[in-house]
Amino acid sequence: MVTSSRRLVAGLLAALVWSAALRTVPTAAGTRTPTEYDVKAVYLLNFARFVEWPDAGFATATAPFAICVLGSDPFGSTLDETLAGETIAGRNLVTRRIAHPTDATTCQIVFTGASETTRLPAIVDALAGRPVLTVGDETAFTQRGGMISFRLEQSTVRIDVNPEAIRRSGLSMSSQLLRLARIVSAQP
Amino acid sequence: MREIRVRHTVAIVVALLAVVRSSPGVAEETGSRPLKALSVDELMQVEVTSVGKKAQHLAEAAAAVYVITQEDIRRSGATTLVEALRLVPGVHVGRMSADDWAVGIRGFSSRLSRSMLVLIDGRSVYTPLFAGVYWQVQDTLLEDVDRIEVIRGPGGTLWGANAVTGVVNIITKSAADTHGQLVVGGGGSEERAFGGARQGGVVGDDLHYRVYGKAFDRDGAFSRNTRDFDGWHMGQGGFRTDWTPPSGPDHVTLQGDYYDGAAGERAVRTTIDPPSIGVSIRDVDLSGGNVLGRWEHAFAGGSGAALQLYYDRTNRRDVNFLEDRDTFDLDFQHRVPLGVHEFIWGLGYRVSSGRAETIPSLVLAPSRRTNHLVSGFLQDEVVLLDDRLHLIAGSKLEWNDYSGVEVQPNVRALVIPAPGHVVWAAISRAVRTPSRVEQDLEADTLTDPSTRTFARLIGDGRFKSEKVLAYELGYRVQPQRDLSFDIATFYNAYQDLLSAELGTPFAEPAPSGTRTIIPVTLRNRLRGDVYGIELAVEATPTEWCRLSASYAYLEVELSPDPGSRDVIAHSEEGASPHNQVVLRSLLDLPYHLELDTTLRYVDNVPAQSVGDYVNADLRLGWHATPNLEISLVGQNLLEGHHAEFGSQGGVPLEIQRGVYGKAVWRW
């Protein structure tokens, strides 16, 4: 019994020493490995830059450009941090969290997380014909009528684009972005 | 002995520190420019970690859920699904031999884990023959596993009977996420040789597919008094297709597997005539297959439905018995959001038919038995106060032909008092329903050759379900982005637990002379109080380093009902360790290297005469090119061999230190 508790203490001690030592290693500022959602947040910013919205898509001439997260929010603070201080064609960029697809009609970009998979048709229905860019976290999103979906390839983030769905909403995507995306078949 | 062990630990720690300190430039690959300044094609090359997603999933559950990700499996060096469960706080995994494991969640560790439900892509792998899971035949290409969700605590309301102590959900990737070719191969001292290959792609635009095959050969465990006999080899192949028609809100999955192999087992064989006792050692032939189809449909208005059908076949040629079993299962689920409510309801039907043959001293009569299971459930989740209060209530209603109607309700609440804080509580009832053993079994074991006395274990069909009423309370907090804590406590009140009642000895005539039989009957005359706490911490102190630590404490107290002459309470009580600690570190080093360490302490398992132990696994991985990953893994490094759980056919086996190398090539 004595031996076993000594063994435990030895093991725990070693582990403590080791984790404490790790914490003292200085982090070089600004060189941390980004998380998946750090990168996705920057993608959303780029979508705002590389897609054109008609003026009719905004309530007023000075209305902000809204990027909305529908349902559960996987970004934490990183989306707000990424968009802080950015403007799109003179409009301030803002983030909003929304609970229902119908709230998305006043957004320019709607991001839907993995938790919303079964609500996809409702989202697509609610936004049909409106100039709202729909972005999904699941690969299947574009195949189900969404416009852009994220896809993890090894440990990099890539995008799928459904150009037909974008065209029908009255938006246009720059060929610069289209060129880099995997094109998902348009609906019949 | 101890000194050597400590010296080993110290050596590993020193080695680690040396490497860590010489790695200031780890993250410089992403460049010093902020992500925002990258062009889109540069952005596409940025390597990311997916810690955030996992934390998100966990935060929303009103249960003690732990998710083992693909990354966790890859970096743990685990070569089987069951070994990966060692990462979960509060789960006890005791390897009994090369091919047998005892697993326990919150107590009751045993070879077949009778109170725990295991599903692979929605297919139950719990056998109604002996109640439990034969881990040796639960496999797939590990690289294709998306995640393993482990729920500690009852899951009867959603998953049905036998989800008493916990549920293990093994979920493989969609075929849409496994395009391309993958070849994996390796070998070593214990993992003698293994290899696998997968080919994935898409037909047209929407029919994604993959096919895979794998095989392995494992060395036996260490035995002090016999040559090792538990070598193990197996081959498995399978496929999965996922089809999403472009126009529709449908998703259709079709998948299947086939496996064949053999594992060495040793068992005591009792005969009616003298010498009455012998030992059999032989390769147990194992084979089986399954095919599963699932159709998911999302309706306008936000509701969704899933219809699933599977067929599963298992063939087992064990030492003292054989069984062939066919199972069909049909399951329907419908999710309906309605204002602040979200209803989920479902219906299920399962028919399972097994044919057994046995040696004369072991009787399973009738030799074939077919069981039916009909179930339905309804659960409502109400989200109030701006998403900060979730209330969940529901129940399963199930009918089986052993114990009739079973009700398994639960009530759960989840509160988010402030961002980053989650408090949850649950009260639930779950049952473990009878299996063939408690219904049809008579098994004789010689206890005294001089008087020709045999103990006879009798399952006569009067065994009822085991019941638990579980009270759980949990708290999760993420004080900062790179640090999270998860605390879960529970009190499980068991009733009608399995007991083995000693009866009055009687004489039985046999051709070779009269024998004395001591009957031991399976009944439900134990009560149990099981309580404990599980703590887990995850931290990312620097971005190239992930640390996690967990501690679990468990107390199992069983008491026989008045008048009971039970003989197993003691061994059930001591089947799981009181204390367990797991420490892990995952380091991303320069030159595309990874160094991953797991250190674990498992308290003694008194019922199995197994002492406590500290052991360590170490993995060094190298991404030689974006397509090629090479790794060297050391398992159980701190001791030459150590016991983890029980014995086979009376012979205690010990798990040996093992080292293997592995290469994974994708293109």
Image (spheres, helix red, strand yellow):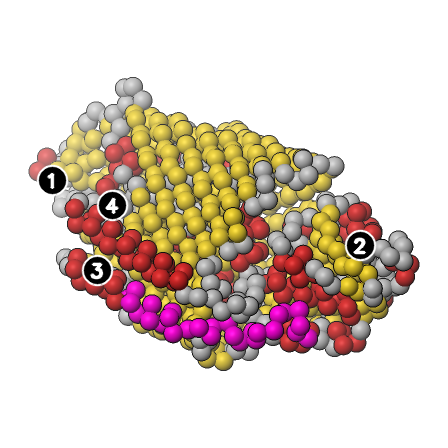
Could you tell me which residue is drawn at 17 percent across and 49 percent down? A3
Is label 2 in a helix, a strand or a loop? Answer: loop
Is label 3 in a helix, a strand or a loop? Answer: helix
**Which stretch did the figure color magenta?**
B12-39
Q: Pointer 2: residues within 10 angstroms few (<14), some, or many (20+)?
A: many
Same chain for the residues under marks 4 and 1 in the image: yes
Q: On the image, numbered disc 1 is attached to which residue?
A: B449
- Give the left or right position of residue A164, taking residue B114 as reference: right
Q: Pointer 4: residues within 10 angstroms few (<14), some, or many (20+)?
A: many
Question: Where residue B76 sits in the image (x, y, percent)?
Answer: 40, 62
Q: On the image, numbered disc 3 is attached to which residue?
A: B6
Viewer-side label of 4, 1: 4
Amino acid tagged 3: Val
Q: Quadrant of the N terminus of chain B?
A: bottom left
Q: On the image, numbered disc 2 is attached to which residue?
A: A107
Viewer-side label of 4, 2: 2
Q: Answer yes or no: do the residues labelled 2 and 3 have beta carbons within 8 Å?
A: no
Amino acid tagged 1: Pro
* In magenta stretch: residue B354: no
